[in-house]
Amino acid sequence: MDKLMKVQKKIALVAHDNRKKDLIDWIKANREVLSKHFLHGTGTTGKLISEETGLPVKRYNSGPLGGDMQIGARIIENEIDFLIFFWDPMEAQPHDPDVKALLRIAVLYDIPVAMNQATADFIFQSNLIEKEYDRYVIDYSERLNRAIKL
């Protein structure tokens, strides 16, 4: 698996309904940096980002209709390098299991994840955003095989 993130990153942008405005405001403030990368988004969020910022966004289904799972699959296929997910910690979502699965995949494949503005700001202020980066992806299949033999 190719673990190298190129200079031009593939960034997934996701937000729960109560956080969409926050994400769009953050994108507007970081439009110049984001315009240099490939943007992906779940249904409504991706549509709003395109309409509000003019940035092109490859769109998937809405989160509750499988969009989170589609983003997770793209992480596995090395088509997503980053996940910016402004989630609502105060409201249960009907697709919470999908969200948990998406975050698990992001950790498994060692991609940066920002779930709030402060983390997104720190990531995008890092000089690594402008460089290639070789992710450290643990070979869990080897560890699983070892555990089965015990």
Image: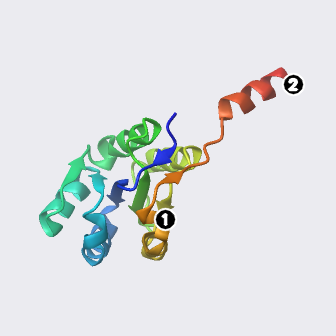
Residue 135, percent from left and from top: 56, 49
Residue 31 in the figure: left or right of residue 88: left
Question: In the rendered image of this protein, does residue 104 appear above or below residue 23?
Answer: above
Q: Residues within 10 Å of mark 2 (few under 14, many from 20)?
A: few
Residue depicted at x 42% and y 74%: 117
Give the secondary structure at mark 2: loop
- Location of residue 108 (image quadrant): top right
- Residue 112, relative to residue 104: is it above or below? below
Horizontal relation, residue 137 to residue 48: left or right: right
Numbered mark located on residue 150 in the image? 2
Q: Is residue 55 left or right of residue 78?
A: left
Badge 1: few (under 14), some or many (20 or more) residues near its Cα, within 10 Å?
few
The one nearer the camera, 76 or 15, is 76
Q: Earlier in the sequence, mark 1 or mark 2?
A: 1
CA gap, disc 1 to disc 2?
A: 40 Å
Where residue 72 sits: x, y (%)?
43, 42
Q: Secondary structure at mark 1?
A: helix
Q: Amino acid at mark 2?
A: Leu
Which residue occupies 27% across, 76% down?
A: 25
Q: Nearer the viewer, mark 1 or mark 2?
A: 1
Q: Position of residue 124 (x, y in %)?
A: 42, 70
Q: Position of residue 99 (x, y in %)?
A: 45, 50
Which disc is residue 3 wearing?
Answer: none
Which residue is at 51% across, 48% downward? Answer: 106
Task: Indicate which disc residue 128 carries.
Answer: 1
Relative to 75, does residue 35 appear above or below in the rendering?
below
Type of residue at label 1? Answer: Leu
Q: Quadrant of residue 33?
A: bottom left
Nearest the eye: 129 or 20? 129
